[in-house]
Image (cartoon, rainbow, N blue to C red):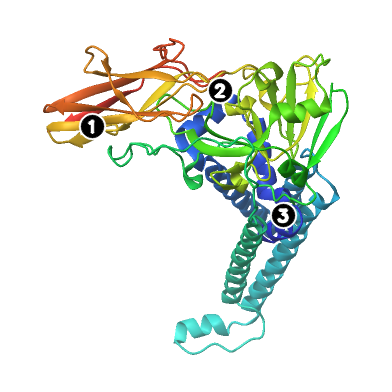
């Protein structure tokens, strides 16, 4: 596995057997189980999955070793089946090519050679022990046994330890190469033709532990199906618009940089976000307006009702066409918070559509937009029965005090964030111990597409208290109190936090 991982890092990282099997598991996992994994493990769900794959493979490899002690051909054959499953998972990926075979074949060859070598050493050590009774005599008399050039049991263990160390080194080498391949050179973005306004100072200095007004790149949530990040060559990358358009158009990265760029502060939300959850983030995006790109392809006479976006590895996302071109600040983003998109957030380009959950709007690593209809083609999440039209539900979150926090009696700050993308926040209200809803003080407004911070000073008395919050949009929509799970169109409900005051 380790050697295959190194070979994959040098050729096709996604073809690493561990990644390929893990990706297949993700695709085959029922939606309720996926939601459970995200709820239980959060952004660590990928690490848990990969760790589970490795543990299962090691256990099955142990079975191969036991079988080989009795019938070597059976044990090696079992190991070949394991390697074959990893190879099949790699070559059956969308967009797989001939190079995807090599990591799995490497795993098969290295595994068979290692097992055969260890079996031979083990057999030689056992034969030597039977033919040289000096070992038993020495054990009875305390004398030193005769030396032998035949491998000992200790020699077998040394070889095993050596193979284990080599595996660790090869795996580390593969990871190092992969990280080097993900490095991004600085990109000089031209001054946007339509820049964002001056960014205000948030409440984070006044209200400790409140979410910052803008999310740093490293803290921005990441939820996707990718176990390894794509390494895209910016010089060869292109964005194609085809399907039900007047003409197919293809743009290079330089083509996009030469177009009039827009810059906007926009909040994104994942549909998997539970009430009060962490999968929401705000950043300053720079890119090309989506409508400008579609106009070059010609869509006035189209019969399409969706944009089917495809990433560099074949993942598909469907976006309602009418929402994408209704005047909101939809864009193909090239930069985030003043720099190029980080790899984990879609480098070199991604779609951003304010007001829609990411699974129907935020295709990362995008390379194609096909105008079509929902009847003709289904995207990845649509096939799994998620909603096709998924506007973000108005919501709010209590950042401070934390659930089950212990505090001292006296004045405390209740604070958090609220969002109603593409609508805007009118007010946020807090309820204490089931009492009346109290109006909070809002932080600075960036845009209607950006979240609002809020706070309420509270004279806390000793005891256990129940805090709740809700948001009201500029269109009069009140945050829904009915509790719903994320599937199929986003969670709803009012967050409640228990606080202990002494």
- Mark 3 residue element: helix
The one of 389 and 323 positioned closer to us in this rendering? 323
Measured from the top left, where is residue 122 in percent x and y? Answer: 65, 69
**Residue 368: x %, y % from top left:** 77, 34
Cα–Cα gap, marks 3 and 2? 55 Å
Which mark is drawn over residue 413? 1
Q: Dot 1: within a 10 Å radius of its alpha carbon, few (fewer than 14), some, or many (20 or more) residues?
A: some
Circle 1 SS class:
strand
**Quarter the C terminus occupies:** top left
From what the image shows, is residue 91 above or below residue 27?
below
Q: Earlier in the sequence, mark 1 or mark 3?
A: 3
Q: Is residue 274 left or right of residue 466?
A: right
Q: Is residue 246 left or right of residue 237?
A: right
Give the answer, above or below, for where 265 lies relative to 58.
above
Q: Nearer the viewer, mark 3 or mark 2?
A: 2
Q: What is the number of the mark on residue 75?
A: 3
Q: Which mark is residue 355?
A: 2
Q: CA distance from mark 1 to mark 3?
A: 64 Å
Q: Which of 170 and 197 lies nearest the eye of the viewer?
A: 197
């Amino acid at each position: 596995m380790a050697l295959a991982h190194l070979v994959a890092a040098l050729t096709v990282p996604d073809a690493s057997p561990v990644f390929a099997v893990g990706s297949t598991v993700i695709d085959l996992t029922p939606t309720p189980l996926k939601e459970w994994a995200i709820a239980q493990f959060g952004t660590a769900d990928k690490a848990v999955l990969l760790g589970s794959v490795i543990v299962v493979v090691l256990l099955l490899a142990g079975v191969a070793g036991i079988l080989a002690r009795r019938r070597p051909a059976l044990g090696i054959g079992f190991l070949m089946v394991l390697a074959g499953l990893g190879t099949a998972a790699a070559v059956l990926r969308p967009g797989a090519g001939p190079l995807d075979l090599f990591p799995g074949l490497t795993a098969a060859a290295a595994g068979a050679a290692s097992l055969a070598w260890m079996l031979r050493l083990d057999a030689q050590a056992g034969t030597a022990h039977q033919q040289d009774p000096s070992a038993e005599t020495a054990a009875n008399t305390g004398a030193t046994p005769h030396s032998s050039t035949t491998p000992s049991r200790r020699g077998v263990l040394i070889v095993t330890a050596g193979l284990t160390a080599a595996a660790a080194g090869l795996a580390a080498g593969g990871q190092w190469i992969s990280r080097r391949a993900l490095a991004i050179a600085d990109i000089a973005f031209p001054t946007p033709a339509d820049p964002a306004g001056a960014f205000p100072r948030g409440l984070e200095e006044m209200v400790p532990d409140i979410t910052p007004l803008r999310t740093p790149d490293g803290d921005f949530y990441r939820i996707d199906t990718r176990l390894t990040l794509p390494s895209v060559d910016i010089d060869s990358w292109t964005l194609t618009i085809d399907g039900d358009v007047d003409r197919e158009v293809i743009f290079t990265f330089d083509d996009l940089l030469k177009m009039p760029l827009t810059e906007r502060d926009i909040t994104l939300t994942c549909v998997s976000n539970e009430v009060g959850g962490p999968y929401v983030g705000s950043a300053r995006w720079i890119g090309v307006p989506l409508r400008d790109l579609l106009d070059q392809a010609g869509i006035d006479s189209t019969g399409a009702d969706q944009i089917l976006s495809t990433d560099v590895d074949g993942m598909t996302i469907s976006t309602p066409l009418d929402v994408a071109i209704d005047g909101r600040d939809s864009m193909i983003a090239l930069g985030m918070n003043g720099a190029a998109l980080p790899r984990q957030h879609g480098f070199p380009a991604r779609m951003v559509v304010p007001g829609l959950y990411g699974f129907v709007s935020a295709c990362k690593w995008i390379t194609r937009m096909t105008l079509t209809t929902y009847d003709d083609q289904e995207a990845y999440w649509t096939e799994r029965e998620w909603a096709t039209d998924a506007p973000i539900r108005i919501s709010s979150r209590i950042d401070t005090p934390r659930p089950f926090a212990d505090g001292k009696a006296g004045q405390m700050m209740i604070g958090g964030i609220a969002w109603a993308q593409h609508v805007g926040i009118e007010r946020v209200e807090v309820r204490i111990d089931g009492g009346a809803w109290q109006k909070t003080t809002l932080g600075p407004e960036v845009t209607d597409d950006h979240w609002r911070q809020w706070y309420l000073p509270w004279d806390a008395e000793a005891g256990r208290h129940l805090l709740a919050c809700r948001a009201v949009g500029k269109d009069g929509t009140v945050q829904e109190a009915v509790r719903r799970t994320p599937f199929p169109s986003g969670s709803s409900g009012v967050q409640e936090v228990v606080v202990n005051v002494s």
